[in-house]
Structure formats: C-alpha cells, structure tokens
C-alpha cells in the first residue's frame, strides 16, 4: 500500500496537488478521497501491478490477475451476465470474459463508494453499449472500458462518458526514487 500511495502522489502532481500536504478521508465503507479537493481517484493492485486513475469526475479502477478458481463467483453475477458467460465454450475465453466482467463490476462499486457492500447481482453490464444498469435504469453519464494488460490480467475503468482515458506507465524504480 505504500507503493500505491506513491503512485497516487506521482499522479496527483499532474493536478498540482502534493499528497503530503493534503488530508485523506475515508467514507464508512473505506473509500479514500482527498478532503478539500474536487479530484477523484481509485487504486487497485493485483500481483505485480498497482494501478491508479485520477479524474475531475467520480471514477473507479480495478486490475485482476487471472486465477483458476473463480467459477463459483459467477453465481454472484446478474442473470444477464451469467447467460452471457454461458456462450463461451473455450476455457480461455470464459476466463477472459469473467475477469473483464469482474473488474468492471469492481470498478463500478469503487466509483460509487460502496465496494463489495453492494451485491454484484444488483446491477448489470450492458455489453453492446459499455453501460451499466443499476436499479433498473441505464446510468447514462457512465461508461466502462476494459483492457488486457498481459495475457493473464484484466484492467477496467468506469467513469464519465465524455472523459478521455490516457495511460502513463511508471517503473517501480522511478516511483520509489
């Protein structure tokens, strides 16, 4: 988590913010935010990667390395997501699609600040439009984007539909120096 804070500090420099002079506050579900700034961020890590997204709008990010034992978790997805996953006969394709859905759902619950206190079957992905349906309605101002980082990692970001996402890769040596 120290390297995650260093990555956040590194990214906040682009917004003219020095994390060492700012206060982090946490909501009742543990979501951190900057106390006196209209800047939003989200952090995730999995195995060898730490990722951070920073925005002027609410945002969520998740990265996940593929693991073998995940099929029981599908039971926690929405009915439409379960049906979508049933289409994949290939184990590799099923794994990729599962972790794509998982990281999008994780990103969304981070964006809304509830984390896994929000049940994963209470909202669904609208796959053909990169949208999220929550409480029976499409969340129009949000979109999701997913990326394959390596052959066995999925990364997803949920944020404002009009916001462009750009990546900056930082080597751990640069981050810790």
Image (spheres, grey):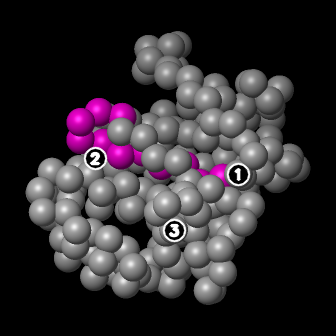
The reply, left or right, for residue 16 in relation to residue 73 is right
Q: Are marks 2 and 1 in contact (CB under 8 Å)?
A: no
Residue ID for mark 2: 65
Distance between mark 3 and mark 2 Cα atoms: 23 Å
**Figure disc tally:** 3
Residue 14 showing in the rendered view: yes
What's the residue at 36%, 34% (across, down)?
149
Element assignment for label 2? strand
What's the residue at 67%, 47% (across, down)?
41
Element assignment for label 3? strand
Residue ID for mark 1: 161
Distance between mark 2 and mark 1 Cα atoms: 26 Å
**Nearer to us in this view, 86 or 105:** 86
Residue 84 coordinates in the image, percent (x, y): 32, 71
Q: Which residues are magenta?
A: 149-159
Q: Earlier in the sequence, mark 3 or mark 1?
A: 3
Residue ID for mark 3: 126
Mark 3 vs mark 2: in front:
3
Q: As displayed, is residue 146 above or below residue 177?
A: below
**Nearer to us in this view, 137 or 156:** 137
């Amino acid at each position: 988590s120290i390297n995650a804070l260093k990555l956040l500090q590194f990214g906040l420099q682009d917004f003219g913010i020095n994390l060492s002079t700012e206060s982090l506050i946490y909501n009742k579900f543990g979501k951190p935010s900057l106390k006196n700034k209209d800047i939003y961020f989200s952090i995730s890590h999995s195995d060898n990667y730490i990722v951070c997204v920073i925005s002027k709008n609410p945002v969520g990010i998740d990265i996940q390395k593929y693991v073998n034992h995940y099929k029981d978790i599908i039971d926690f997805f929405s009915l439409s997501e379960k049906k979508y996953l049933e289409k994949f006969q290939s184990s590799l394709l099923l794994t990729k699609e599962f972790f794509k859905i998982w990281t999008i759902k994780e990103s969304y619950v981070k964006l809304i600040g509830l984390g896994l206190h929000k049940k994963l079957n209470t909202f669904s992905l609208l796959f053909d439009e990169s949208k999220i349906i929550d409480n029976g309605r499409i969340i129009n101002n949000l979109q999701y984007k997913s990326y394959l980082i390596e052959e066995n990692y999925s990364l997803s970001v949920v944020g404002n539909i009009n916001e462009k996402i750009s990546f900056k890769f930082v080597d751990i040596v640069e981050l810790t120096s």
